[in-house]
Every structure is written in C-alpha cells, then in structure tokens.
Image (tube, rainbow, N blue to C red):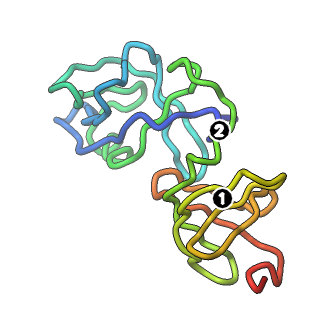
Amino acid sequence: MIQLSELALVGKTGKTHGIKGELTFEFSEDFDIDACDYFVFEIDAIFVPFFINAYRFKNDTTALILLDGITDEPHARELSGKSVYVKREALGQSTEAPTLSYFVGFSVHEQSHGVLGVIDGVDESTANALFMIGERLIPVSESYITDIDHDKRILHMTLPEGLLDL
C-alpha cells in the first residue's frame, strides 16, 4: 500500500479535455514528466496509481494527459481537481520524513481546542523540538500528530490534557 511519506506533490489536475478522457495537468516548471511512469491520486483515503498512456504539452507548466483505464470524459471528471503525486524516488528524493521547518506556515488544529494558530517557527535548541505558534510552544511528537493535510497545509494534533494550560 502506498503511503503519503513515499510521495511528492507535483501538480494538480484541471478540467477534462475532449471526450476521450484527457485531463489538464498543471505542474511546476522544474517537474520532469519523463521521469515518471505513473501518477498517484488520493481516492477515498487510499493512494491509487494510474499509468500515463500519453501526454502533450500546452505550455511550460501545463500538459494534457491520458491515463490508463480512463477512456471517457465522465471517468476523467472523477480525477479533475485532484492533487497529483509521484513516488519520491522517481524524482530522486528521499522517502525520509520532511524536516521540521517544512511545517512552518501550517495551521494547527487540535482535536478538542480547534484551531491553535499557524506555526511561526521551530525551536530545536532543546532536546525536544517545539513548534512555535504565537506565544505557545507545542512539543513536536509523532504521537500527538493525528493527520497531515499537505495540500491545505494543516497539521491535525491531539495534545495531552492540560498541555495548553502551561
């Protein structure tokens, strides 16, 4: 089963194009589509690969793609507006977890307290790293993180009772 930690976000699908299942694919200029045999989409909370049958460029950051198994406009519409991922190794990237500075700018949503704010920085000067959210310091622990929404830049956490009262 494909895990999010194995993937890199490379773009997003746009509108369908024509009736044969083509999709508009928007990506950054530095993405090399030739390095990938397939794209990965999140469908019903599962990462599903689709092999690339064909593609043609519209400009430097947009292509029209045909995916294996998508042969008509209604099926293509189901993938419209979705984030497009590839395996990190296809890009020459490590599958290691992102560095803590990656989370700067993420909004933190705590299960019982709601939105705590946006991570302003990371303090790694102590044995336990801390997320800085305004005046608050939140210990960085995988056990506190329940979900990471990379697209919306939201970190979902469940913190021990009383931690926010310190």
Q: Which residue was labeled with disc 2?
A: 5
As measured in the structure, the alpha-carbon distance from the residue carrying label 1 to the one carrying label 2 is 12 Å
Give the quadrant of the N terminus.
top right
Outermost residue on the top side: it is 34
Which mark, residue 147?
A: 1
Q: Mark 2 packing: few (<14 Cα in 10 Å), some, or many (20+)?
A: few
**Mark 1 touches mark 2? (CB < 8 Å):** no
Q: Which residue type carries mark 1?
A: Asp
Residue at (52% x, 47% y) in the render: 43
> 8 above or below 145?
above
> 132 above or below 97?
below
> 17 above or below 57?
below
User: Along the horizontal axis of the image, is 32 left or right of 91?
Assistant: left
Q: Position of residue 109 (x, y in %)?
A: 60, 72
Outermost residue on the front side: it is 125
Frontmost residue, 141 versus 10: 141
Frontmost residue, 27 versus 132: 132
Residue at (40% x, 21% y) in the render: 52
Q: Position of residue 12 (x, y in %)?
A: 35, 41
Residue 65 quadrant: top left
Q: Mark 1 packing: few (<14 Cα in 10 Å), some, or many (20+)?
A: few
Residue at (63% x, 32% y) in the render: 6
Give the mark nearest the N terminus, 1 or 2.
Answer: 2
User: Along the horizontal axis of the image, is 68 left or right of 63?
Assistant: right
Q: Which residue type carries mark 2?
A: Ser
Secondary structure beneath label 1: strand
Residue 140 quadrant: bottom right
Give the quadrant of the C terminus.
bottom right
Q: How many marks?
A: 2
Secondary structure beneath label 2: helix
Q: Position of residue 23 (x, y in %)?
A: 27, 35
